[in-house]
C-alpha cells in the first residue's frame, strides 16, 4: 500500500481529524518538555508536580480531598498518591486526615509549598512567554488558541493562575 496515498492531510477545506489530533499531541509534548526543563532545572519539580501544587493552591484553605484532586487532574487515586509522595517528602504538601471521617484524607499545601509555588509560577510564566514569543504569536493568535483549547475541553482562561 502506498503510504503517501493514505497519509492524513492537514490542509484544505476538510482537514483530517486524526492528523489534527496527532499534531495536538506533538504540540503538547513539546510544551510539556519545555515546562519540565525549566521547572526541573530551577525548582526540582516536573510540570505534573507544579500542576498538583497549583490545584491545591486554588482550593479553599489550600487543601483538597485526594480523590477530588485526582478527578480535577484526570488521574486515578493511586496516580495522585504516587504524584504527591515526593512532594510530601520534600515538605511542599502535607497529608491531613478529615476530622469527621478517618477514611478521608486531604492533600494540603504547606507554607513552604506556597512559597515555592510562587517561585515556580514566576518560572512558568517566563517559560510560557518564551514559548509564545511576540515575534511568533500575536495576542490575537493566543486568544484564538485559548478559545479553541477551552472548546476542546480545557479550563476557562485564567482559571489556572490563582
Image (cartoon, rainbow, N blue to C red):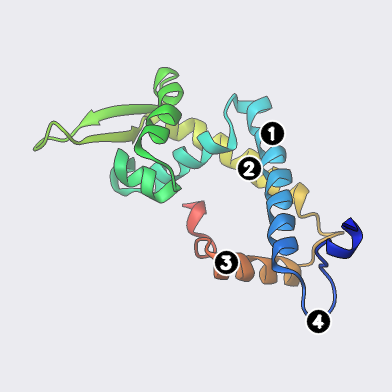
Give residue 152's mark: 3
- Are dots 4 and 3 in contact, CB under 8 Å? no
- Are dots 1 and 2 in contact, CB under 8 Å? yes
> Which quarter of the figure has residue 56?
top left
Q: Name the spot of residue 113 as percent of width and height, x first.
A: 43, 30
Residue in the picture at 68% in, 72% down: 144
Q: CA distance from mark 4 to mark 3?
A: 20 Å
Q: CA distance from mark 3 to mark 2?
A: 23 Å
Q: Name the spot of residue 148 as percent of width and height, x first.
A: 63, 70
* Left or right: where 76 falls relative to 146: left
- Mark 1 or 2 closer to N-term? 1
Q: CA distance from mark 4 to mark 1?
A: 38 Å
44 lies above or below 104: above
Q: Name the spot of residue 68 as percent of width and height, x first.
A: 32, 46
135 lies above or below 29: below
Give residue 13's mark: 4
In the image shown, does 125 or 72 lie closer to the viewer?
72
- Mark 3 vs mark 1, foreground winner is 3
Give residue 124's mark: 2
Amino acid at each position: 500500500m502506498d503510504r503517501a496515498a493514505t497519509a492524513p492531510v492537514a490542509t484544505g477545506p476538510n482537514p483530517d481529524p486524526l492528523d489534527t489530533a496527532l499534531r495536538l499531541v506533538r504540540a503538547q509534548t513539546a510544551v510539556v518538555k519545555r515546562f519540565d526543563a525549566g521547572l526541573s532545572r530551577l525548582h526540582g519539580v516536573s510540570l505534573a508536580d507544579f500542576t498538583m501544587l497549583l490545584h491545591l493552591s486554588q482550593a479553599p484553605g489550600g487543601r483538597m480531598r485526594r480523590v477530588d484532586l485526582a478527578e480535577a487532574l484526570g488521574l486515578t487515586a493511586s496516580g495522585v498518591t504516587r504524584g504527591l509522595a515526593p512532594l510530601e517528602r520534600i515538605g511542599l504538601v502535607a497529608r491531613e486526615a478529615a476530622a469527621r471521617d478517618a477514611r478521608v484524607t486531604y492533600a494540603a499545601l504547606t507554607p513552604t509549598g506556597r512559597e515555592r509555588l510562587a517561585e515556580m509560577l514566576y518560572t512558568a510564566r517566563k517559560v510560557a512567554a518564551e514559548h509564545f514569543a511576540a515575534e511568533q504569536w500575536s495576542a490575537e493568535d493566543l486568544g484564538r488558541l485559548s478559545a479553541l483549547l477551552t472548546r476542546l475541553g480545557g479550563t476557562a482562561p485564567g482559571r489556572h493562575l490563582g
